[in-house]
Amino acid sequence: MKNNFDLEKMQELWDRQSQSLQGRQLISDEEIAAALTPRHKGRWLPKAAAAAALLMMAGGAALWLSQPQQVLPTSGSSTMLTTPQPITQTEVLPASSEKVVLRHHTRPLLAENTAPAQVQEPAATNAIYDTVQLDVPEAAISEDDKKAAPVPAMIETHRLVTIGTTRPEAVPVIIEGNNLVMLSDEKPEYRPLRFEEVPKEPERPTFHDCVIEPLLASII
Amino acid sequence: MLKKLHTEAAFTAMVRRNEALIYKVCLAFASQHGTTVDDLKQEILCKLWEGYGSFRHQCAESTWLYRVALNTALMQQRHEQHLPIIQPLGAHEEPVCEAAEESSQLEQLYALIARLEPEEQKIIYLYLDRLSGKEIAEVMEISEINVKVRLHRIKIKMKGMAQDEEQL
């Protein structure tokens, strides 16, 4: 061929090859069926892709297993208040059910001349509480949280609490609408409160999130 | 569901009508690379099925098939270029020519084609498959004159390559 390379002759050779293929089944029904099947279901995966998918599965499974169990409250109100300031001078007493009593060792919360005009419930604010009951599920407070807040708390029955700030002494606060009003000696400070929905279901990643999704993504 | 079944049946019929066309592309392009005829066939079938939904029959069925099959084969060729060519003894694909001499000549022809540029490979393949200049132009989406010019250059190039091999 090399000596007398002639494309016309090659064409004749090509024709003979074509003729020899006539009448033969060159593509099987299985091969056509495999092509009609979505790739990630029935098609052969290259070895490298399969190995990568296996690694991803193993990694995803390890990640899933390493997730700590989250115990979240399943009862109570649908809103949760997160205080932006740490609670200090607080003694956490175990309580029945899901309530924890936070006992504040405080002096009288409000001096007579510091009640701000914005306070909507003067009767309540004038009261002096040294025990405030917060609706804080026991499970939501870790051992560390018991020593140093912030503690997610839903203030349910009492509108007047005392929380600690960066200042050493406790500061009385009032919940006013969506604001936490810190009644310092000089001027009340307003801090917006953050309300969060309490998730009904634990937010633990599922096997599907950790393994199946990445696997499908790697294949597609 | 009914539409899906109808589409699948139409696709299967199209493949059956053109299986020699598909198979010959596989023979020509698989033999020189690390892939097998079966792998390349499966890849081409998958690509055809992926594109079948968007095939509007604005060109001849064979034109579209050539386009997809050749592009897939060349794409596969690029992917396989970094792999060593594995051809165990006696592991040739099905001998399609009765005479061993012819089979050997075809192998050499495939080897020559593999050394051309991808676009040139397509043109010479279509030429060998007896497509007219107009048909080649349709598949390649270039003008007929351009096809003639390129074909002329490819013939010279292939003769040169054949002579070089002879000297070696």
Image (cartoon, grey):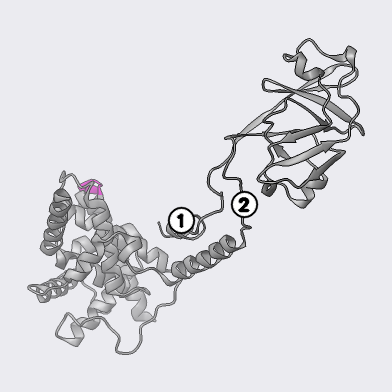
Give the chain of mark 1.
Answer: A
Could you tell me which quadrant the N terminus of chain A lies in?
bottom left
Mark 2: give few (<14), some (14-19) or many (20+) Cα within 10 Å.
few
Give whichever of B30, A79 is nearer the camera.
A79
**Residue at point 12% right, 64% down?**
B16
Determine whether A216 is above or below A114 in the image. below
Residue lying at the far left of the rendered structure: A23
Name the N-terminal-most of marks 1 and 2: 2
- Give the residues drawn in magenta, as a range: B141-146
Q: Amino acid at mark 1?
A: Glu
Residue beneath label 2, please?
Answer: A71
Pointer 1 and pointer 2 on the same chain: yes
Q: Nearer the viewer, residue A183 or A37?
A: A183
Q: Which residue is situated farthest in the bottom direction here?
A: B89
Within 10 Å of disc 1 (Cα), the crowding (few <14, some 14-19, many 20+) is few
The residue indicated by pointer 1 is: A213
Q: Residue at x 52, y 64 (%)?
A: A56
Dot 2 falls on a residue whose secondary structure is loop
Residue A164 x/y as whole percent:
84, 33
Inspect the magenta stretch and tell me whether residue B38 lies in it.
no
Q: Which image quarter: residue B23?
A: bottom left
Taking the image as drawn, is residue A87 in sight? no
